[in-house]
Image (spheres, helix red, strand yellow):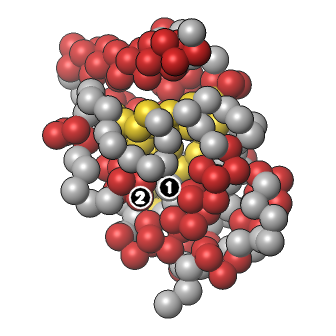
Amino acid sequence: MSSAADFLPEKLTLKALGEASEGCRGCELYKDATQTVFGQGRKGARLMLVGEQPGDKEDKEGKPFVGPAGRLLDRALEEAGIDRSEAYVTNAVKHFKWKPRGSRRLHQTPRAGEIEACKPWLQAELQAVEPEAVLAMGATAARSLFGPKVKVTKDRGRPLESPLAPLAAVTIHPSAILRLRDHDEREAEFAGFVADLEGVASTLQGAAR
């Protein structure tokens, strides 16, 4: 079975990885995607944020978290006192998985095999960035980073033991907040999301002292 490992460059720098990822054929998702959407940020970023996969707007623009979920993430990061430009933002899966409904392209959750096939890119990003904290946003990111035993509902709000970074944690995905129709419920979930980000930021500030 093919995977992203077959397409990794010799030098695992962010620039080389981003360029190599454009030709990835490690799973079938590339066939229906406009382009690969690789991570964005710099080597040495203290915080790595990992989402599920690109959405419709990300697929068209080639950048992570630039659609509605990205705008919500930006708002939450600002409230938590985190400068997005200082973080590294990426997804567990680098191609947009979707199904057509009329003129719209509806998101589909990646299968376990697709998550596994794409994992070498995420592992290489972690190696290149060397973050002090990694935060998985949503179930797909949590599975890719920490395996199937880690669940957002069960493990949210507490530090996880992981070789990936000194601080590892999980939270909900911003798109999960957007899907809530009740205003009060949506505001409560957003506040919880900000609190999770604040917890990570506080720990990083403490480590910097």
Image vertical order of residue 204 relative to residue 109, above or below:
above
The reply, left or right, for residue 113 in relation to residue 48 is left
Which residue corresponds to the image point at 62% horizontal and 76% vertical from the top-left?
Answer: 5
Verify CB contact (< 8 Å) between mark 2 and mark 1.
yes
* Residue 201 seen in this snapshot: no
The reply, left or right, for residue 96 in relation to residue 135 is right
Q: Secondary structure at mark 2?
A: helix
Q: What is the x, y in percent for residue 132? A: 55, 33
Q: What is the x, y in percent for residue 3? A: 56, 79
Which residue corresponds to the image point at 48% horizontal and 24% vertical from the top-left?
Answer: 72
Image vertical order of residue 177 relative to residue 40, above or below:
above
The residue under label 2 is 144
Task: Calculate the distance from the C-alpha at mark 2 to the C-alpha at mark 1.
Answer: 6 Å
Please identify the residue farthest to the bottom as the structure is shown.
1
Q: Secondary structure at mark 1?
A: loop
Q: Quadrant of residue 70?
A: top right
Which of disc 1 and disc 2 is earlier in sequence? 1
Q: What is the x, y in percent for residue 49? A: 52, 37
Q: Which kind of residue does numbered mark 2 sit on?
A: Ser
Where does the C terminus fall, quadrant-wise? top right
Q: Quadrant of residue 89?
A: top right
Within 10 Å of disc 2 (Cα), the crowding (few <14, some 14-19, many 20+) is many
Within 10 Å of disc 1 (Cα), the crowding (few <14, some 14-19, many 20+) is many
Please identify the residue farthest to the front as the structure is shown.
209
Q: Quadrant of residue 28?
A: bottom right
Which residue corresponds to the image point at 70% horizontal and 25% vertical from the top-left?
Answer: 85
Nearer to me, 107 or 123: 123
The residue under label 1 is 92
Which residue corresponds to the image point at 32% horizontal and 39% vertical from the top-left?
Answer: 160
The reply, left or right, for residue 147 in relation to residue 174 is left
